[in-house]
Amino acid sequence: MQKDPFTGGETFLEGPRLPGGEAWQRILDGHGQRLRALDQVGAKAAQCAIGTDKDRALVLAQGDEVGLLEFAEPRWAELGDAIRAFRATLPLVRLEDFGFDSELDDPFEANTTRLHRIGGGVEALAFADAQRSVYKFFLFREGGDLGATFRYDRADDGLFVATAVPGSYRRLFEKLRLTHSVGMPTEILGVTPEGVLVAKQTYGQPLPAQQDVSGLDPERFIPIPSRFLRADRDHPRLAFLDGEPWLVADTHDRNVVRDERGALRVIDLVAAPLSDTLLERAPLFRDWIARAKEDPRAEILAPVNDDEL
């Protein structure tokens, strides 16, 4: 662990160097702690009859958000404690820490003296420093949405149709945890008072344009048979996080790089969990996922014993 040169907070990533096993695990543990702390803030806020249709207000809450109310009733004190515990997992940082001017209409329009733009899309802009550490700035939309996830619908032919839709802070935290688990090491440095989430990632060598990535790590990214699901993003695949199935897609050549060892790694994706409630509506899909968890090359239909025919 070392200090990030921009925020002064702890970091385990620098340039193209992959972190060791202990550092990798500590980043993963941090992702989990952050998600649990955010859930706790939401639960305590609900006890105080604070309702939010977006989680942006919870993510940006300050440690003294409830002020004197903490002395009024225990439930408000519990909310204050939950906010401070969450804030410890997601510090407030400033765009100025990275050399950007938060007062500008577009603070990311130009490079800074220490960061230069290397990519970006609808969700985030990516910059690199002199050590080739990658800093990603996730931009919120008007209304509080952030990032992207999938919505599932059922088509007339019985297939699930996965459509990319705006996401939330929690879903973005989950996606970055998933990216760290199955792709390029990724940590979260903090969030700005405006709501820009800042992540840091190990640098990877970009691939040539239009390179075929359909065979990307089939043990981690299992192609989903088209008879079960259609998605409006490239290469819909099955991945597992803590043993739970997720749909991941958008793993095209611009979202895949080579790490320092030459292995292909995903740096970005669109993802959503495949919940038990959802899969109850599709027994064949559910059964295939259970078999694919044990054998990524599992056939669409389970083998049948000849004696049972």
Image (cartoon, rainbow, N blue to C red):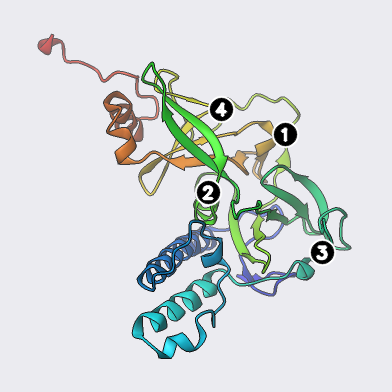
Going from N to C along the chain, the mark reached first, 3 or 4, is 3
- In the depicted structure, whether residue 215 falls above or below residue 45: above
| Residue occupying image coordinates x 82% and y 66% | 103
Spatial distance from mark 4 to mark 1, Cα to Cα?
Answer: 23 Å
Residue, disc 3: 100
Amino acid type, callout 1: Leu
| Residue occupying image coordinates x 39% and y 29% | 296
Residue, disc 1: 207
Q: Secondary structure at mark 1?
A: loop
- In the depicted structure, whether residue 287 falls above or below residue 5: above
Quick check: can you spot residue 223?
A: no
Amino acid type, callout 4: Asp
**Where residue 236 appears, x then y in whole percent?**
51, 29
Question: Crowdedness of circle 1 by 10 Å Cα count: few (<14), some, many (20+)?
Answer: some
Q: Residue furthest left?
A: 307
- In the depicted structure, whether residue 309 falls above or below residue 66: above
Spatial distance from mark 2 to mark 3, Cα to Cα?
Answer: 26 Å
Spatial distance from mark 2 to mark 4, Cα to Cα?
Answer: 18 Å
| Residue occupying image coordinates x 43% and y 86% | 70
**Where residue 249 appears, x then y in whole percent?**
54, 34
Q: Are marks 2 and 1 in contact (CB under 8 Å)?
A: no
Going from N to C along the chain, the mark reached first, 2 or 3, is 3
Give the label, 2 or 1, closer to the camera.
2
Question: Crowdedness of circle 4 by 10 Å Cα count: few (<14), some, many (20+)?
Answer: few
Viewer-closest of 120 and 242? 120
Residue, disc 2: 175
Quick check: can you spot residue 59?
A: yes
Residue, disc 4: 232
